[in-house]
Amino acid sequence: MKLLAPFLAAALIAARAAPPAIDGAKSVALPFSLGEVRLLDSPFRQAMEKNADYLLSIEPDRLLHNTRRYAGLEPKGETYGGWEARGIAGHTLGHYLTALSQQYAATGDMRFRRRIDYIVSEMAECQKAYGDGYIGALPPLELQTMRNFREGIVEPLGPFNFKGGAWVPWYTEHKVLNGLKDAWTLGGSAQARDVALRLADWADSITAGLTQEQLQAMLSVEQGGMMDVLAELYVLTANPRYLDASRRFYHRAVLDPLLAHRDELPGKHANTQIPKVIGEARTYEATGDPNAREIAEYFWGLVAHHYSYVIGGNSENEHLFPEASMSHHLGANTAETCNTYNMLKLTEHVFRWDPRAEYADFYERALYNDILASQEPRMGMFTYFMSLKPGLFKTFSTPFDSFWCCVGTGMENHTKYGEAIYFHGRDDLYINLFIPSVLTWGEKGFSMEQRTDYPAGNQAEFSIISAPDSPLAIRVRCPGWAAGPLTFELNGQALGVEGAPGSYAVIRRAWKKGDRLKVSIPMAVRTEAMPDAPEKVAFVYGPVVLAGDLGPAPRTATVPYSEDQDANLDAPPAAVPVLTRPGAPIESLVVRSAGGPLEFHAAALGLPRGIALRPFWEIRYDRYNVYWDVAVREPSDSR
Ligand SMILES: [Zn+2]
């Protein structure tokens, strides 16, 4: 413990304040707490710092405006705009509490802790004013809709509304409850525990009397991660009341077909469904129910392998479509960022039970090419859709007048890059991601620093800072995309370790302070084709999707920042050249420029010299193209 900086110790103590009370299904690989992994300089740490600045620029009293107002108390700040001024008001406060809590857990920075404490105390006051345990910022229509559930009145009106237009009230309340839960377990707020459990009791009380038919009607409207957060509260408290409440959110129409391995996803709203499956994943961990695991693993395989674009995101216009039509779904409103946030959550669960490189490969793909790619680095703003329309550009939020769902999940995303770099078993350490960081595995007395310029470079070095006397297996992910077996050196000597792509290389020994493990990961350019259009391909180098940089997008009132996520859907795209393919494999014709940063050219494919291929995540303000049409050049054409 003496290796730990005081703030890390504080964060660990905070995490221990809420030990899991139940350990139903044993996970094989467990995540580290955020306080055990410190990021060193990298694009991820820079994104985290920019995001932290944004978090601090938000005024809690303004975010609390509707919470106080609807509780009958005088607001202390003006309301924010965008979705915070609509029926979904309050969702951001929940995300904000989670983001603050994760940031605090990762860094120990007391500025975030003070905000957590202030917001929770304000919410406690409002909860008291509401009087029945409810807390949130739902406008009267949405709140009355929920209170009517207690009377057995459930009147859905389409997938997002109840009668009168009430907009996804459970979705919103999930954010509030989850934020309070995180303020308790990660933010160290004991008061948050009380407020969270009173709200959970309220959620239980208004649903306890509903018939199965009424519940299923209620669940036809998007409900966020209610099943997930209630199952987690059950794990944290061992109170079966929360498990009962959680199971009421089992949506048969979506989950039963998944259990039967029937793919009925086309046409469904993506981000409504993924959290239901995360709820099943959490249920498996809480209870060991094999059906819950079956649903989670089957769904993960479907979405990761059959519904995802090369960047790891999914959906067009928020909806899933058949894989056989994917090439017709390259519009401006592809890949809602929330979906990827949720797929990463689900990926972490399935990885815990069955630590396969395949899962970590997907995590890495979506992390670099969608999550990191979703942040705008000047103001720390967020994408909603990640447009894959050829020749279009990214549209980012505004600081205080957007507050879309993807702003909420977005502010969480960049606080938790330390979450999935490493996992551990009892005597195993999994290295999943090559991100510069220091791991302090306090319980084991093991500490290690990772240095790398990956993916520009293809090596990572791990220096042991401290280690226990007993042997420990370090398991290094060998990415499935690697261009050959990974190779390893220990203290400058080659190690004869199997490093086959798509597996874990295992190095088991009694590690000593000062040991240096070096990993080399063969990388090459490869193509990934559209499943329904083999001549439409994206270029990928190592973990990084390469996009053609087509030059600056014009700055307008909605470019690059927009209050409305749909503002630029009809913007005219730039022309994108069709590539031509001679006989040679096209991967070999994409050539990396000399020097440090990742930049490629493909003149031999007819790509003009002025269009460089660069990591998609690095393109923020320019027009771009990800999927290229490649025509075969007839022999007679070739001079
Ligand atoms: Zn969203």
Image: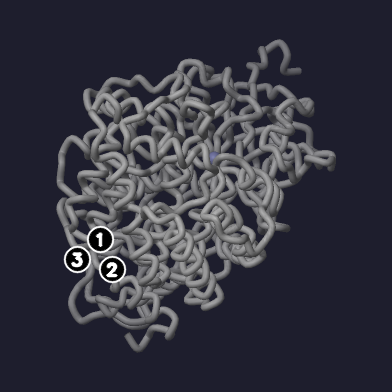
Between residue 178 and residue 572, name the one nearer to us. 178
| Residue 366 disc label | none
- Taking the image as shown, residue 555 lies to the left or right of residue 263, namely right
Q: Residues within 10 Å of mark 3 (few under 14, many from 20)?
A: few
Apparent side of residue 226 relative to residue 560 in the rendered image (left or right): left
If you read the primary sequence from the N terminus, does the residue marked by circle 3 or circle 2 appear first?
2
Give the quadrant of ligand 1: top right
Pick the front one: 612 or 187: 187
Residue 415 versus residue 405 in the image, above or below: below
- Residue drawn at x 78%, y 40% as measured from the top left: 558
Residue identified by numbered label 3: 426
Query: Which amino acid type is marked by label 1?
Result: Leu
Read off the residue under disc 2: 18
Q: How is the image coloured?
A: one colour
- Figure quadrant of the N terminus: bottom left
Does the beta carbon of the residue at mark 2 sit less than 8 Å from ligand 1?
no
- Tag 1 residue: 236
The answer to whether the residue labelled 2 contacts the one labelled 1, judged by CB atoms less than 8 Å apart, is: yes
